[in-house]
Amino acid sequence: MPQPAAADPSLAFVFSRPFAEQVAFFRGKLGNLVPTARWDDIKKSAHDRAFMVAGAAKADLLADLAGAVDKAISEGETLDDFRKRFADIVEKNGWHGWTGEETAAGRAWRTRIIYQTNLATSYAAGRLAQLKDAGFKYWVYRHTPNEHPRLQHLAWDGLTLPADHPFWQTHFAPNGWGCKCKISGANGPETAKLAGGKPGYTEPPAGWDAIDPKTGEPPGIDKGWGYMPGAQSDALRSFVPAWRDGDLPGACHACIRDGGEPKPTLPPPRQAPADRLLPSGEAPQWYVRRFLSEFGVEPGEIGLFRDVAGEYLAIGESLFIDRQGEYKALKRGRERHVLLLADTIRSPDEIWMALETPDNGKKRLRRRYVARWIVEGMEVPALTVFEWSRDLWTGVTAFTPDEASYLENRARLGTLVWKRQP
């Protein structure tokens, strides 16, 4: 599991327990880095599917900022850590004219807004996934004690409502800039009390669904915050990408340009027993089960696997099923190689990362896991590549020198982020 998100003492009550759903939600946004001019260019639930920083328009800048926020969320980096990264990113990318740049107080305010907002919304989305997966019948609003409480948020403390009450569609915390409220789950009056619910407080206050003309939101909610973070992401299931049919993509716009420098030599290939190549002729479900079992996942489940570099991948049966319910990724002999693909994900020789710009113009981060295997009974080493992005994945294994050389040249593009030591 990742470390607790945010070691900032002022956020300690909110971010007191680490959980992988928070990391998965944030990383699910990295396939859609959106340039913006203003903070409200992206509104409400659109944030579930996109990463933005107001005023950041360049792809490299956005990718660097996304990486800094990811460190804060997944590794529990403090606000001070984030501020140092932010300063380095601004200097590296030559970013000027951003709100708050002019003064030390402005820079402190802006970095805190970016840091805290991303941590709070990703926490809320991850928490929502947990509440739904656990099947809690009731949710409890919890106000976080602080020196300057928002009176309306404080008034909601202990409110216990059915999980499907419309109140939660607009009031699922956080409910504004810097809000540290959270939501707990319960299955009855006694557990609601243990979760902070107040006996008898089972109806929202009168006028809770009125609209403040100044904000366009119900009273007590800041402009743009009247939504449920993560409601559009379908918990972990939406983070399992679809199969990318066709050849492994080549040219890309790298997150960090490699400058055309020669690639390092791959580590020596490792031994793999003959049974890592599966027999032909089995039902598609059999191959899927064999792949999923390598990660301790059953069909119908979604599991999170943390790779050697600390990144999380959502693993599930839908990796292999297209929208028509067909096992599209298990054709033309690919099914025999699924265990080698699993081995490459779990124990790669290298991991490369790049920023791809498809024809639709929406940028997506992609990771490529590369490994070479000496399969018992095969004359030459096999090269296996597993590519993962927010919405697409593909896996390829080459068993001849020409195929392996071609695949290696196309796979090792972008930035080398991890390398196995021989």
Image (cartoon, grey):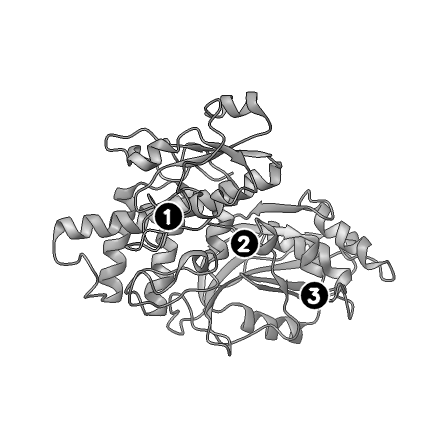
Which tag, 3 or 1, sits closer to the chain's start?
Answer: 1
Marks 1 and 2: which is nearer the front?
Answer: 1
Q: Is mark 2 on a helix, strand or loop?
A: loop
Find the residue positioned furthest to the front. 206
**How far is the residue under mark 3 from the one under mark 1?**
38 Å
Q: Where is residue 223 in the image (x, y as percent from the top left)?
A: 32, 53
Label annotation for residue 218: 1
The amino acid type, in three-letter code, at marker 2 is: Ser
Q: What element carries label 3?
A: loop
Read off the residue under disc 3. Answer: 323
Label annotation for residue 233: 2
Please tell me which residue is depicted at 52% across the width and 51% down the height of the picture.
231
Front residue of 294 and 163 = 163
In the image, residue 370 above or below residue 192: below
Find the residue positioned furthest to the right. 281
Q: Position of residue 198 (x, y in %)?
A: 45, 24
Front residue of 65 and 50 = 50
Label annotation for residue 127: none
Could you tell me if residue 8 is visible in this image? Answer: no
User: Is disc 3 surrounded by few (<14), some (14 to 19) or many (20+) residues within 10 Å?
Assistant: few
In the image, residue 211 above or below residue 393: above
328 sits to left or right of 357: right
The amino acid type, in three-letter code, at marker 1 is: Pro
Front residue of 180 and 341 = 180
Q: What element carries label 1?
A: loop
Find the residue positioned furthest to the left. 103
Which tag, 3 or 2, sits closer to the chain's start?
Answer: 2
User: Is disc 2 surrounded by few (<14), some (14 to 19) or many (20+) residues within 10 Å?
Assistant: some
**How far is the residue under mark 1 from the one under mark 2?**
24 Å
User: Is disc 1 surrounded by few (<14), some (14 to 19) or many (20+) residues within 10 Å?
Assistant: some
Q: Position of residue 341 (x, y in %)?
A: 67, 57
